[in-house]
Amino acid sequence: AYALAGGVGTFVDVAGNDRYDTDNFSQGCGYYYGQGLKLDAAGRDVHAAARYGQGVGVHYGMGVFLDHGGADAYASSGPIQNAGGAFDHSLALFVDAGAEGDVYDLGRSEALGRADFGAVAIAADLGGDDRYGTKARPGRASRGGAAVFHDAAGADDYAAAGGLPNGAVTPDGQGGLAIDR
């Protein structure tokens, strides 16, 4: 019998204003027992992925996405699981650690701390006045999943993301939690 599961993928960028346009299963995605890491240390970057991108774990995988600084933009053509999404007993971590405001144009994707089928997902933006646009509100879980979305600072705009209030802790009743400080 052949065992083709697993593997490790790592991408590190230390500086520069970059644009990443990728398709499915990319930018720190761990798929089918695999592990993915994407680290971007600095710059005003655009991170665009179709589905299962930007710190996502799928089918027992583990995905990590870390962006350290810069006013960044995130985009997805969808249809599901970007920026801290986990599916089917996987782990996902998405962190934008910059102090600047970021724009999340994820209106075609369920994203930012989404976990389904026994998975665990964490998505955090640690600073800045951010603007969120998502297909469903951040910090959602279903079918035994556990998910957390945390925005640590700034006056954020959630009008296009289910209307989450600034300064509130909002559970979804299924194992998900959205926190805005």
Image (spheres, grey):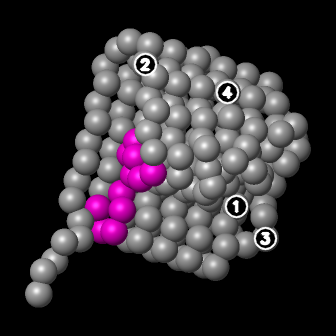
Q: Nearer the viewer, mark 3 or mark 1?
A: 1
Is 167 inside the magenta-drawn segment? Answer: no
Mark 2 in CB contact with mark 3 (< 8 angstroms): no
Earlier-in-chain disc, 3 versus 1: 1
Kind of residue indicated by mark 4: Val
Magenta region, residue range: 24-34
At 29% from the left and 30% from the top, the residue drawn is 12
Q: Secondary structure at mark 3?
A: loop
Q: Which mark's residue is nearer the viewer, 1 or 2?
A: 2
User: Residue at image x 83%, y 39%?
Assistant: 160
Q: Is residue 74 above or below residue 129?
A: below
Q: Quadrant of the N terminus?
A: bottom left
- Residue named by callout 4: 103
Whether residue 168 is visible, yes or no, is: no
| Residue type of the residue flagged with mark 3 | Gly
Q: Earlier in the sequence, mark 4 or mark 2?
A: 2
The residue that appears at 56% across and 23% down in the rendered structure is 72
The residue under label 2 is 18
Q: Nearer the viewer, residue 107 or 86?
A: 107
* Main secondary structure of the magenta stretch: loop
Find residue 58 and report its horizontal and vertical position in percent: 44, 65
Identify the amino acid type marked 1: Arg
Q: Is residue 177 visible?
A: yes
What type is the residue that disc 2 sits on?
Answer: Asp
In this view of the protein, which residue sits in the foreground, 43 or 27?
27
Mark 2: few, some, or many residues within 10 Å (few <14, many ≥20)? some
Q: Which residue is mark 3?
A: 173
In the picture, the disc for residue 140 is 1
Q: Quadrant of the C terminus?
A: top right
